[in-house]
Amino acid sequence: MTGLQRSIVILYCLLVVYCCVWIPWRIQVHTPSEWQRPSGYYRAGYGWSWVGPRNPQSLRYDSSYAAPDMPLIQLRIVAVTSIAAGGFVFSGMLAKSAPRRQTLLNLSACRVPNVRTSRDPSFAQGPVEHLGG
């Protein structure tokens, strides 16, 4: 999992929590004249899940009858999930197609010639005389 994919997963989790905490509210409306049609509802606005709809004075109906709008909440979660899944897959494709970057301090590739260590058997023979000309 790349860093971008981790960021997408964290953002996805935060957005799902947001979708479940800041929710749309609706009020079921049953009128006698609409007995043949399915019952309607009035959107009461958004609000915290533990408080209810905001600004209840502007509503035409009593906000104490407001209930969470579950189909709209489900739609929001499905939308966030599909967008995050697409971003996750796309970031994975980007990571596979990007060329590998080499680190600046790749010490295993650096070999220093003519360095003798105590593990080298010729180390006990003493200093190496340099034959110069």
Image (cartoon, rainbow, N blue to C red):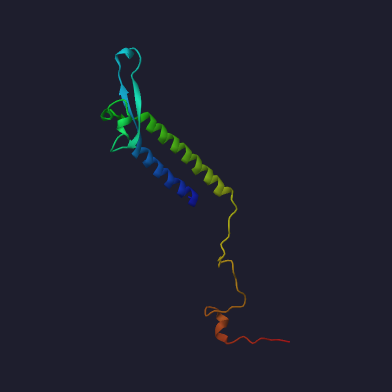
Q: Which residue occupies 52% across, 46% down?
A: 92
Viewport quadrant of the C terminus: bottom right
Residue 2 can be seen in this image: no
Residue lying furthest right: 133
Residue 67 drawn above or below residue 101: above
> 63 or 14, which lies in front?
63
Q: Residue at x 35, y 17 (%)?
A: 38
Q: Residue 60: tell me if it is visible.
A: yes
Q: Classify residue 78 by image quadrant.
A: top left
Q: Residue at x 33, y 30 (%)?
A: 58
Residue 51 spot, x, y in % from top left: 28, 37
Q: Nearer the viewer, residue 19 or 44?
A: 44
Where residue 101 appears, x then y in whole percent? 58, 57
Residue 27's spot in the image, x, y percent? 31, 26
The quarter holding residue 120 reads bottom right
User: Is the residue 112 above or below the residue 130 in the image?
Assistant: above
Q: Is residue 52 left or right of residue 108?
A: left
Reply above or below: 64 against 11: above
Q: Would residue 90 be found to the left or right of residue 67 on screen?
A: right
| Image position of 47 (left or right of 104) | left
Q: Nearer the viewer, residue 132 or 104?
A: 104
